[in-house]
Image: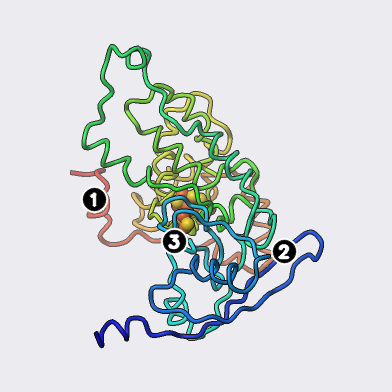
């Protein structure tokens, strides 16, 4: 009984919500309420709305990290509100004040509700469903997935379309041709599915975009379902060698990877200047070298790496020597 009481100990928190509507623009509202150690942030918002301020707008449905509708920023972190306990935030930040804001990148409709049209457009670009063979559709053949294929796909099939990864991806903000992390996770999930019949078309949709990711790993960090979109991007890059008509972005990306491989194979180190020259060619390298000179970084660009003494071991590890 004593244990039960301590479990339900109440703590007062201040919830600071970033609001927006067309009439007033942006403003902040504060609410005080008591929470216990089981109180999810969706429950906090529900109580604020029902007990204190019916004008506040937010989305939530399943309350169990399945529907993806409660994505928002809590204390600046992209999170699912239903998967976030209020007191965990208090403990983590050492403050009883918790800020709640809409996701970044997307246009805010009202308060914590954002327009997800851009997100859905990205997702539908990659044809997010299985295209089975005619024989399977006619019921003349089975469409079985082997356990090893299921193992490869399982993680990437866990996406709940919450949009958190896209909201925190720097590449989608600067590159309109980049499909974004969630679309890549979804696209690869079908690209790697042996039951699917439109591999070439999928690779064409995903190939160029895959080489536009900056590998910052933000999508990996924020995904509430551990989907690892960046891993699907790496795996898609590994398949662009099968692309028939490669774009300049794909060609440059593949050249860059080859140059890094050769640098490690030959010296055991990453020779930045040489890798850059091999990837981008002399004309671009000269232009960029002038830029480096102007910014006092020339000495770094010209460092010539010496081979590491155990180079033979590295080459053996890379399968280049017996
Ligand atoms: S990959 Fe993760 S963060 Fe991105 S939309 Fe899917 S579930 Fe959300
Ligand atoms: S790793 Fe790539 S996809 Fe993921 S957040 Fe960074 S740039 Fe975006
Ligand atoms: S309410 Fe469904 S994921 Fe949070």
Front disc: 2 or 3:
2
Q: Is residue 68 above or below residue 136?
A: below
Q: In screen coordinates, is 95 left or right of 17?
A: left
Residue at the outermost left position: 322
Residue in view at x 26 percent, y 84 percent: 3
Q: Name the secondary structure under disc 3.
A: helix
Q: Does the numbered disc 3 mark a residue whose Cβ is under 8 Å from ligand 2?
A: no
Q: Which residue is mark 2?
A: 20
Front disc: 3 or 1:
3
Where is the C terminus found, in terms of image quarters? top left
Disc assigned to residue 221: 3
Q: Is residue 124 above or below residue 79?
A: above
Q: Earlier in the sequence, mark 2 or mark 3?
A: 2
Q: Is residue 302 above or below residue 85?
A: above
Where is the N terminus found, in terms of image quarters? bottom left
Residue in view at x 28 percent, y 56 percent: 311
Q: Which residue is mark 1?
A: 317
Residue in view at x 52 percent, y 82 percent: 13
Residue situated in front as seen by the camera: 257 or 83: 83
Q: CA distance from mark 2 to mark 3?
A: 28 Å
Front disc: 1 or 2:
2
Q: Earlier in the sequence, mark 1 or mark 2?
A: 2
Residue 272: give x, y in percent of width and height: 49, 56
């Amino acid at each position: 009984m004593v244990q039960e009481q301590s479990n339900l100990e109440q703590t007062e928190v201040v919830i600071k919500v970033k609001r927006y509507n067309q009439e007033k623009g942006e403003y902040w509202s504060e609410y005080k309420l008591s929470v216990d150690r089981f109180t999810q942030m969706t429950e906090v918002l529900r109580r604020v709305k029902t007990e204190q301020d019916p004008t506040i707008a937010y989305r939530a449905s399943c309350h169990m990290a399945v529907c993806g509708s409660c994505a928002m920023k809590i204390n600046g972190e992209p999170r699912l509100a239903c998967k976030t306990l209020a007191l965990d935030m208090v403990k983590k930040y050492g403050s009883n004040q918790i800020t709640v804001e809409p996701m970044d990148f997307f246009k805010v409709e009202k308060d914590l509700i954002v327009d997800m049209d851009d997100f859905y457009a990205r997702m539908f670009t990659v044809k997010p469903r299985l295209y089975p063979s005619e024989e399977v559709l006619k019921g003349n053949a089975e469409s079985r997935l082997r356990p090893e294929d299921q193992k490869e796909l399982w993680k990437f099939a866990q996406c709940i379309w919450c949009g958190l990864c896209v909201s925190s991806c720097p590449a989608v903000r600067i590159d309109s041709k980049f499909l974004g992390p969630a679309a890549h996770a979804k696209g690869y999930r079908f690209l790697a599915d042996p039951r699917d019949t439109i591999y070439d078309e999928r690779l064409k949709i995903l190939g160029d975009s895959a080489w536009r990711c900056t590998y910052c790993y933000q999508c990996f960090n924020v995904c509430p379902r551990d989907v690892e979109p960046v891993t699907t991007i790496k795996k898609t890059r590994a398949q662009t060698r099968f692309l028939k008509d490669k774009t300049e972005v794909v060609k440059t990306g593949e050249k860059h990877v080859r140059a890094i491989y050769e640098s490690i194979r030959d010296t055991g180190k990453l020779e930045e200047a040489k890798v850059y020259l091999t990837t981008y060619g002399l004309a671009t390298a000269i232009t960029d070298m002038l830029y480096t000179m102007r910014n006092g970084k020339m000495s770094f660009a010209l460092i010539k790496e010496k081979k590491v003494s155990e180079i033979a071991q590295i080459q053996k590890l890379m399968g280049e020597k017996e």
